[in-house]
Image (cartoon, rainbow, N blue to C red):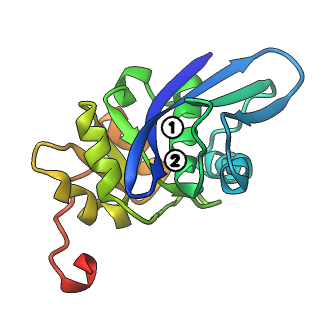
Amino acid sequence: MYGQISTVAFVGVEAKPVDVQVRITPGQPAFAIVGLPDKAVAESRERVRNALHAVGLGLPYKHLTVNLAPADLPKEGSHFNLPIALALMSAMEAIAPDAIQGYAAIGESALDGAIRGVPGGLPPAIGANAVGKGLICPEACGPEAVWAGDDVNVLAAPHLLSLVNHFKGTQMLARPKPNNSKSAII
């Protein structure tokens, strides 16, 4: 079983494209993350495992490999949680792979399945748009991400379950409104 989604790695303020690839294979149960992850990315295993459990999805008792490509680009931060969770959900067929194919994703997973905000919603939206993709992000990042332009498809979700429902067509996530307050611009 295989799942994939795009995300970004930050190099300064620039968002470099990263592919999150998940393969579920028979074998000794394990959950490995490869591709030069830092400690926060490596800890994604526990946050993602618990967030998926909170929405009723247990990880299969198999070997799970998460590849963050390109392998030579350092990956830092908790914003890799959501793309890893979405790629796993795609591999487990909880979300149709073609539903997330046109998106990049950023966001931190809480243990209860909530999607927590991460710093910098605008650079990932610009980066996703540059490669012809929309952006899936935390609800808290949506008002900043939509500043990338009217043509950028931004899905800002508060919870993993709201994304599952959106992609199944039972709940539609509205495009966020841009944040116009001075504190958001500073």
Residue 66 is situated, as x and y percent measured from the top left of the image, at: 66, 31
Looking at the rendered structure, the kind of residue marked 1 is: Leu
Q: In this rendering, is residue 61 above or below 110? A: above
Q: Is residue 22 left or right of residue 152?
A: right
| Quadrant in the picture for residue 61 | top right
Task: Between residue 153 and residue 56, name the one nearer to us.
Answer: 153
Task: Between residue 91 and residue 132, name the one nearer to us.
Answer: 132
Label 2 SS: helix
Q: Is residue 106 left or right of residue 38?
A: left
Residue 152 is situated, as x and y percent measured from the top left of the image, at: 18, 44
The N terminus appears in which quarter of the rendering? top right
Q: Which mark is residue 86?
A: 1
Q: How would you rate the neighbour count of disc 2 (Cα within 10 Å): few for under 14, some for 14-19, many for 20 or more?
A: many
Residue 4 is situated, as x and y percent measured from the top left of the image, at: 50, 26
Point 31% across, 43% down: residue: 127
Q: How would you rate the neighbour count of disc 1 (Cα within 10 Å): few for under 14, some for 14-19, many for 20 or more?
A: many
Give the CA separation, mark 2 to mark 1.
6 Å
Task: Assess whether mark 1 and mark 2 are in contact (beta carbons under 8 angstroms).
Answer: yes
Label 1 SS: helix
Q: Is residue 75 visible?
A: yes
Q: In this rendering, is residue 186 above or below 115? A: below
Residue named by callout 2 = 82
